[in-house]
């Protein structure tokens, strides 16, 4: 196949480049990210680069975690449209149950448990009752939003703001360049990366997405894999919700919703196929970084919000088209 | 049927007979229609004042969503999905409101025609990008939703008041009998002119063929690219009608897209259109839109927390689809 691809290109150099890009899709993405950051540094020569890097990471980390949810689910050919609502709910519940440092553990644990319940329901719907993931998670998003709104009306008097511990976790920075949220992100990222590459469970995700019938015939119990998968996704979303509410110092039931579609975009830019079976978490992290850097680059160029949105959408299409070219040629 | 009465006047009886025929044919539609009737009776029971004016209000409030649902149906039937419906509606809404502002009614009619054509072009662009880039529909339309809402925000940073008597008279009120709201007629005419003839034509067959099995359609000589572009263009046209309906109903142009995209997908699925493509029509989604809206207003009449309506919509969406797939599972096992 490679020989064919090479024969099709007249110049061997472009063929080599194309092959490298195809086999290592992270390489062009990292190039793009580096180019964007260099562009930012050139455009803003006076900018405090350390502070910029820290701010970029702080914003990108919750998005990368949400993109991780999408990546994991998309590997099985699904999509999780409830992560925005789940994340907002988790941040809100944690804030509304928090009364002092002693209650932090309970508040976070309750929020995580609720997220796990949501994930389990998603997993049951998709795995056991065969509801299309798009519909299941869309409906679940509505349920969460409504329930969280109702809960908000009940607890409006007892609410006491975002816990200071979460604020620290989401927004503090050490040594001017290292955001504290890395403490959460790095272990999670390592777990996901190892989980996908080195464990049987990770391989099951790829197998299910690549060929559900073949994996069923080989004895995979799809519903168990999916149940666990959606629980993982919802709990990751909850963690992202904690970080976002800590970063913005806001606890609202719609706080993370605007990050839902960018999380899908980050996963796609990272090379994960929406049809399942192909992709990985490293790409999603780079994808999230690219989105955040692009956004800050566009706003530092003085573009109004409108133009930023237009360019943002165009960039997603262009990167995704680039991927489609690379992967369909092989 | 359409060959016998090719004139636009025949749209209503034609649509009615289609409705009756498909209800007989399809148990899903029958169930949905039954649900609508039950909900209407229930609404009447909890609110004895609910009458002709209630129906008129219902018709007006569902019109934009119903048009969005038609747009979504056309795309889903042809095997795609359109996440940019709400953004296109917002863009058209803003364009119409700003261009009609302070102009004569005649000019306004011209603008209305212009924005419908604009919607067609926008939809065609969506389709062309999908066909040319070979990127999944869901990703392209997701990205394009940013582009179109960006343009909307470019034109107007904040909602612009632009009320037009002739435009709001087009959807408010009733025709003849007070039980026949204008908005329903507008919807029926829109579907009757822009969708039914297309569906009955060769091109309509293409759309269903491409949605049902792309490879088979291709091997039977259907140009997949052309079919997809047509599907998205017509969807863009209906999204534009939805945007125009927003301008008419609210009397303003708001640049921020509403939640129409996700609800339109919900309505399409509730309406019995398979997300896998190739199956379903517009009547089911229309009934589903009415169901969703009636649930919302019933919750208000019952003085229940309006958030419960959101929960109920989600539960109904999941529950109905679950029933459908369980029924299908049993059928395939039997």
Image (cartoon, rainbow, N blue to C red):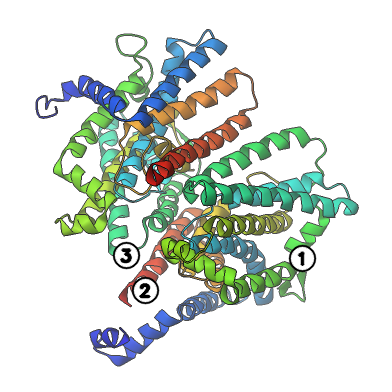
Residue farthest toward the bottom in the current orientation of the protein: A12
In-image side of A86 versus A265 (left or right): right
The kind of secondary structure element at disc 1 is: loop
Mark 1, chain letter?
A: A
| Residue located 81% across and 45% down the image | A97
Between disc 1 and disc 2, the foreground one is 2
Subunit of label 3: B
Mark 1–mark 2 Cα distance, whole angstroms, equals 40 Å
- In this rendering, does residue A53 appear at all? no
Q: Residue at x 63, y 45 (%)?
A: A254
**Along the line of sight, the residue nearer the viewer: B107 or A318:** A318
Q: Are marks 1 and 3 on the same chain?
A: no
Q: Is A236 left or right of B142, judged from the image as shown?
A: right
**Would you place residue B202 above or below residue B138 in this image?**
above
What's the CA distance linking mark 3 and mark 2?
12 Å
Query: At x 46% / y 27%, what residue is drawn?
Result: B291
- Quadrant position of the N terminus of chain A in the picture: bottom left
In this figure, which residue is indicated by the disc labeled 1?
A172
Q: Which residue is mark 2?
A: A327
Q: Quadrant of residue A179?
A: bottom right
Image x and y of residue A174, in percent: 78, 73
SS at circle 2: helix
């Amino acid at each position: 196949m490679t020989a064919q691809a090479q024969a099709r290109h007249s110049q061997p150099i472009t063929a080599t480049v194309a092959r490298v890009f195809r086999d290592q899709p992270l390489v062009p993405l990292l190039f793009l990210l580096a180019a964007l950051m260099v562009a930012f540094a050139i455009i803003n020569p006076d900018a405090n680069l350390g502070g910029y890097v820290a701010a970029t990471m702080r914003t990108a980390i919750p998005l990368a975690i949400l993109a991780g949810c999408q990546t994991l689910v998309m590997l099985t050919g699904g999509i999780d449209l409830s992560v925005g609502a789940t994340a907002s709910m988790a941040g809100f519940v944690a804030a509304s149950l928090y009364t002092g440092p002693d209650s932090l553990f309970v508040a976070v644990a309750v929020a995580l448990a609720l997220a796990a319940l949501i994930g389990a329901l998603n997993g049951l719907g998709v795995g056991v009752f065969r509801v299309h993931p798009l519909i299941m998670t869309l409906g679940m998003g509505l349920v969460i939003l409504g329930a969280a709104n109702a809960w908000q009306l009940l607890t409006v008097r007892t609410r006491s703001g975002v816990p200071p511990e979460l604020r620290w976790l989401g927004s503090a920075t050490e040594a001017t360049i290292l955001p504290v949220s890395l403490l959460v992100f790095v272990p999670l990222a390592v777990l996901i990366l190892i989980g996908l590459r080195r464990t049987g469970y990770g391989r099951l995700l790829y197998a299910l997405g690549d060929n559900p019938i073949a994996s069923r015939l080989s004895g995979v119990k799809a519903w168990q894999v999916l149940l666990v998968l959606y629980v993982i996704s919802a709990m990751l979303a909850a963690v992202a919700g904690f970080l976002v509410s800590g970063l913005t110092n806001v606890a609202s039931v719609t706080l993370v919703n605007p990050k839902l579609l960018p999380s899908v975009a980050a996963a796609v830019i990272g090379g994960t196929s929406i049809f399942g079976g192909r992709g990985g978490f490293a790409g999603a992290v780079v994808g999230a970084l690219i989105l955040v850097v692009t956004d800050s680059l566009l706003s530092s160029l003085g573009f109004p919000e409108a133009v930023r949105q237009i360019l943002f959408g165009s960039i997603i299409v262009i990167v995704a088209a680039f991927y489609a070219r690379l992967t369909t040629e092989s | 049927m359409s060959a016998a009465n090719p004139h636009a006047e025949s749209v209503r009886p034609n649509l009615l007979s289609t409705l009756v025929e498909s209800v007989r044919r399809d148990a899903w539609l029958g169930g949905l229609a039954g649900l609508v009737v039950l909900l209407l009776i229930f609404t009447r029971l909890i609110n004895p004042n609910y009458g002709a004016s209630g129906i008129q209000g219902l018709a007006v409030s569902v019109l934009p969503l119903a048009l969005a649902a038609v747009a979504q149906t056309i795309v889903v039937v042809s095997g795609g999905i359109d996440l940019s419906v709400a953004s296109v509606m917002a863009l058209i809404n803003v364009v119409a409101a700003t261009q009609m502002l302070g102009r004569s009614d005649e000019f306004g009619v011209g603008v209305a025609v212009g924005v419908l054509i604009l919607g067609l072009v926008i939809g065609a662009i969506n389709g062309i990008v999908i066909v040319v880039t070979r990127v999944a529909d869901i990703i392209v339309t997701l990205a394009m939703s940013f582009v179109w809402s960006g343009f909307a925000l470019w034109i107007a940073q904040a909602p612009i008041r632009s009320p037009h008597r002739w435009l709001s008279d087009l959807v408010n009120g009733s025709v003849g009998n007070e039980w026949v709201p204008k908005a329903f007629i507008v919807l029926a005419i829109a579907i009757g002119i822009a969708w039914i003839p297309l569906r009955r034509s060769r091109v309509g067959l293409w759309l269903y063929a491409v949605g049902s099995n792309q490879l088979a359609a291709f091997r039977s000589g259907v140009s997949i690219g052309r079919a997809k572009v047509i599907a998205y263009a017509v969807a863009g046209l209906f999204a534009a009608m939805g945007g125009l309906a927003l301008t008419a109903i609210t009397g303003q142009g708001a640049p921020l897209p509403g939640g129409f995209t996700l609800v339109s997908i919900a309505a399409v699925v509730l309406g019995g259109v398979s997300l896998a493509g190739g199956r379903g029509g517009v009547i089911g989604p229309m009934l589903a839109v009415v169901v969703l809206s009636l649930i919302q207003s019933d919750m208000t009449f019952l003085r229940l927390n309006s958030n419960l309506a959101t929960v109920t919509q989600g539960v109904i969406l999941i529950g109905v689809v679950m029933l459908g797939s369980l029924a299908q599972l049993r059928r395939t096992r039997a």
